[in-house]
Image: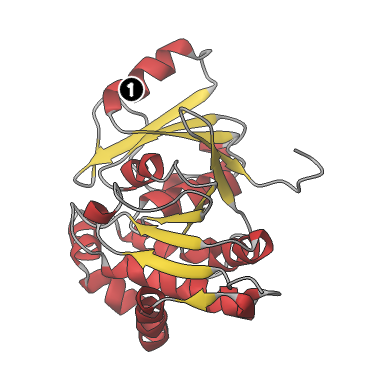
Amino acid sequence: MTDPPRVRVLYEPAARPSADLAGATAVVIDAIRASTTIVAALAAGCRECLPFRTDAEVKAEAKRRPAGSVVTAGERLGLRIEGLNLNNSPSVMTPERVGGRTLLLTTTNGTQAVCDAMKAETVLVAAMPNRRAVARRVAALGRRVVFLSAGTVGTVSCEDTLVAGAVIEALLEAPGGKAFHLEDSARVALAAWRGGKDRLSEIFHQTRGGAYIANLGLDDDLAVCIQVDTMDVVPTVRGDPPVIYLHLPESVL
């Protein structure tokens, strides 16, 4: 008899380098805002998203691409990086801006977490809008899953914890989901979600990251970040350097 696949949540960015991801499904979360931006971009018809650690890498890659084929986006401490087309804003990821194009993205927390997750067998990107779609994919894969919270400038992020809990709840409701065993870290996230899901706007505006974004006048972004189950997309990351694309049925790949 085989052991059930386990579910773990890593809350602090400092835990990522030593995390055992080999053979696991990694789910990366940066609720405010990178993972929500990636989900929104792919839902709007973006061809693919390339995550980078630095803006210099984004600018160098943009120069190598045909004119008009890419959109550059990124922030440091919430502010758009000079020389890039867009901020790290889910609210501006529209078909007119990103449809059919490649998004080159660098952020303070989220793209770093994606790059750190690449030791896993499969890497997915989750946010509130696609939490049920990700849960279905995790259940279908049927292997050990580790949630990687991007955090906020090196600290634990309340909003990332809530998204992890939201995905875990949906996982338990998905076909085959009851076979998963929740470690204590996963139970904490699930309890946080169940205790806060009826007041997401209030909580997201109160967290360190949410309050900071609100003070920058980016409430439109927060409005997207608190939407639940509105985007049926599963961003999947492959390659070295990593590329984020929409998951397709295995028969199509």
Camera-nearest residue between 37 and 234 = 234
Check the image and name the residue furthest to the right. 251
Other-residue count near label 1 (Cα within 10 Å), few / some / many at <14 / 14–19 / ≥20: some
User: In what quadrant of the picture does the N terminus appear?
Assistant: bottom right
Q: In x, y percent, where is residue 170? A: 57, 75
Tag 1 secondary structure: helix
Camera-nearest residue between 147 and 163 = 147
The residue sitting at 75% across, 38% down in the picture is 253
Q: Is residue 150 above or below residue 112?
A: below
Relative to 148, 11 lies left or right: left
Q: Inspect this view and state whether residue 217 appears.
A: no
Camera-nearest residue between 93 and 209 = 209
Picture quadrant of residue 63: top left
Q: Is residue 207 above or below residue 62?
A: below
Camera-nearest residue between 243 and 214 = 243
Picture quadrant of residue 221: bottom left
Pointer 1 residue: 57
